[in-house]
Image: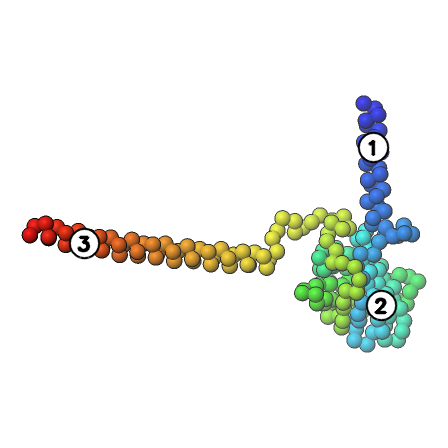
Amino acid sequence: MLRSSLLCLLGATVAMGASEAHAQGPSGDPKPMAEYRGRILPADKDFRLSLLADGSATANWVGSAGKTNVLRGTYTGSNGDYDLSMTADPSSEQFHRSLKLLVRSVDGNVTGDWSTDRYRVVRKAARLELISGKQIAQSDHGASRAGQGRRPVVGMIRSNGAARRASGQSSALKRTVAKSYRSGSKRIARAMNRLNKRKRR
């Protein structure tokens, strides 16, 4: 009994270690899952964003003057739609002390709505694109699958359309059968009348 319990404990420990190793890179740091690149402001030199497997995020924002603002924070969301909240690293050029970024992906097109401590009105990012990795599902960084069990919207629309077409075809078939039945009944009735008339003669 004790031996069985020890084996179970050992198996759970190995599985936990494998899971942690999968979420980490070779150096033990969190593994990058997706990377974006672009410009927040049109005049920026560069903007790079990395989403990591543990739910954290880092960004290098190179402004128009060539200064680099390093930001760190966390993100929530899945499948290309992420809500990020980041603050500037004290050791970097802090031309923005905080950044809130809402990333949205539709049909491969990436957009970003952002605001900072200097620009409090939400603006559109000049350009943003996915350059490596994948669109992260929530389960990849430990969150629950909010969309589990739901059918894609496109699939639902197609299914509903097919159901409506099938229903329409079924109704049309029923009307045809009923019409044929009424028509056949009338012909039979006329034939019986003619037959009865002949018998009377």
Q: Is residue 12 visible?
A: yes
- Precedes in sequence: disc 1 or disc 2: 1
Q: Residue at x 83, y 66 (%)?
A: 48
Foreground mark, 1 or 3, reads 3
| Local secondary structure at mark 2 | strand
Label 3 amino acid? Ala
Placement of 185 over or under 103, stated as above or below: above
Label 2 amino acid? Trp
CA–CA distance in space, label 1 to label 2: 46 Å
Relative placement, left or right, of 13 versus 163 is right
In the depicted view, which residue is nearer to us: 193 or 199? 199
Q: Which mark is residue 199?
A: none
* Tag 3 residue: 191
Q: Residue at x 71, y 48 (%)?
A: 144
In the depicted view, which residue is nearer to us: 87 or 150? 150
- Point out the residue furthest to the right here: 91
| Local secondary structure at mark 1 | helix
Relative placement, left or right, of 3 versus 91 is left
In the depicted view, which residue is nearer to us: 58 or 189? 189
Position of residue 122 measured from the top left corner of the image (x, y, whole percent): 73, 68
Position of residue 75 measured from the top left corner of the image (x, y, whole percent): 77, 56
CA–CA distance in space, label 2 to label 3: 92 Å
Q: Which mark is residue 9?
A: 1
| Local secondary structure at mark 3 | helix
- Point out the residue furthest to the top here: 1
Q: Is residue 97 visible?
A: no
* Tag 2 residue: 61
> Are the residues tagged 2 and 3 within 8 Å (C-beta)?
no
Relative placement, left or right, of 185 versus 99 is left
Q: Residue at x 91, y 65 (%)?
A: 92
Label 1 amino acid? Leu
